[in-house]
Amino acid sequence: MRARSSLLLLLLPGLAFLLVGFLLPAVAMLFAPPGVTFPQVLERLGAMLTDPYDLGIIWRTVRIGLIVTALCVVLGFPIASLLARSQSRWAGVLLALAIFPLLLSNVVRTFGWLVVLGSNGVIGQLLTGLGIVEEAPQLLYTELAIVLGLTQLFLPLAVITCYSAVAQVDPGLDEAARGLGASRTRAFWSILVPLSLPGIVVAATLVFAGSVTAYTTPYLLGGSSQRMLSTQLFSYASVTVDWAAASATAIVMTVLVFLVSGISTLVGRKGATS
Amino acid sequence: MSQTVKQGASPAAGHGTSHGMRPRHPVAGTLAVAGYVVMIVPILFVVATAFTAGSTLRFPPEGLSLKWFGEAVAYTPFVEAVVSSLELAVLATGLALLLGVPVTLAIHRGRIPGKGLLEGLFLSPLVVPELVVGLALYQQLMIGLHLDNFTTLLLGHTALLLPYAVRVTGASLALTDPALEEAARGLGASPLRAFVTVTLPMLRPGLISAGLLGFVTSFNNVPLSLLLQTRDFRTLPVTMLDYVQQSYDPMVAAASTLVLAATVVVAVIAERTVGFAKIFGGINR
């Protein structure tokens, strides 16, 4: 009996904070925003899913999420596999360099793109300086800017997730395949990629979930012309103070993330059993 | 191509003759370089523009000067925000560890049904979008219950860091042998004493990892903190974000460079204490 009460004593303070600081407000926000009833939230959600403007924002968010996910896997997996298989002492330094941005503020990292893509920025100056174009092209506040910013933001996550996946694949298998006459490319595609697939799926899920919920990047690089769900949610909550719309947007965003996590868990489980 | 075939034909030479980076597939190499460019180069441009003598974010900078650093450290909103962010990050990290470590102990050492469910519950703040949590706290606690914004921020940040505290210290605890505590108990130590003298020292790497991760996560947070700002208590990233949106001068580049320098210090501490890669290995299963 004493063991049970001391267990409760260990758990209760943490549980209390979790409930007050996260769970209860989150549930209450979805179902009962101030002065709005749940049917009104649902009604707003229905309107959102049929309105071309709102649908456009949802589709842009999903589209950007998918592109960024693809880019992070395509750029991140090669980095991870090269580093995991290298015996060079530089590999450790390069791995640290890839992880370091995770510690760095998103605002600082995204700000870099303002310097690169802005009207007086590096690319604009370069293009006009070389006489390639008359006037610097509008690169900021475009979907391209958001995609670049989010890829920079989530690539480190893709690299470390793929890295631990590749590191678990026995290097003897690559060498065996190579010894049997497979080319590097063939060994890569038929040994390394399939065996690291569970890790790649986890990386893709984390990147997608991060991209469709990120705020700083679409706010700074997308502006008001390239709204995503996150910037739209902020605008409903703090500019127009439309609680029903804010809750409806929050539901769309949360469902999107849960859906993708669910699919990825299913894929992962299938991969494990087959 | 011929080089690839030749290397493939002599696998035995693979290990023995590798000096530094072995020649790799050109496509993979190119993609990897592109990845590093995207990750690192924009940060370098931030540093370069911070030292400009001019007044725009132009590149190349118009002359060298430290004047924007002077402006940044003299700009009261930034200075106040640094203090606020530090205060919040230290308190939230401390609270999350204080609440999270007992939970980890209960999950790993106690005999309770539904352990997986309980752990899932404590990891759940990682799953819900932070902006959504921020909206919930703003609406329900600040507007609904009239809590002040510091209390709300502290509650929210602590809940957000609990998953780190539980999972990272849990990974550390899983590596320790419960028999050691039992031996201490058998020799007459009280449960508390056994914990403090036996378990806690073994948890050290996990505590440092969770502490560093938690501190950095809280200090840099935007989405959760965004809606919870007031004039009296504002965090640094949100203050910088607002400044960038209003004016387009290199002062934020200077402030960003200072944040970068501080982050390098944190990274060095992380590397010296538990190892950089290990810290981030813990949160991704």
Image: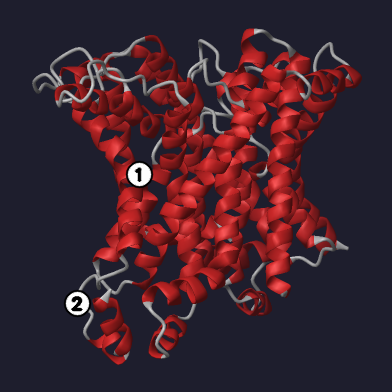
The numbered mark 2 sits on a residue in which chain? B
Q: Is residue A236 left or right of residue B67?
A: right
Above or below, A263 against A225 in this view is below
**Residue B208 at least partly seen:** no
**Residue B143 at least partly seen:** yes
* Other residues around mark 1 within 10 Å, as few (<14) / some (14–19) / many (≥20): many
Please provide percent x and percent y for residue B108. Answer: 70, 65
Q: Residue furthest right?
A: A39
Residue B39 badge: 1
Please provide percent x and percent y for residue A57. Answer: 63, 24
Residue A175: quarter of image? bottom left
Above or below, A94 against B98 in this view is below
Above or below, B218 against B189 in this view is above
Residue B193 badge: none
* Other residues around mark 2 within 10 Å, as few (<14) / some (14–19) / many (≥20): few
Q: Is residue A34 left or right of residue B98?
A: right
Disc 2 element:
loop
Judging depth in this view, the residue of B176 and B234 nearest the camera is B234
Among numbered discs 1 and 2, the one appearing first in the sequence: 2
Q: Amino acid at mark 2?
A: His
Judging depth in this view, the residue of B99 and A189 nearest the camera is A189
Disc 1 element:
helix
Q: Residue at x 87, y 16 (%)?
A: A40
Q: Amino acid at mark 1?
A: Met
Residue under pointer 2: B19
Indicate the colouring scheme. Answer: secondary structure
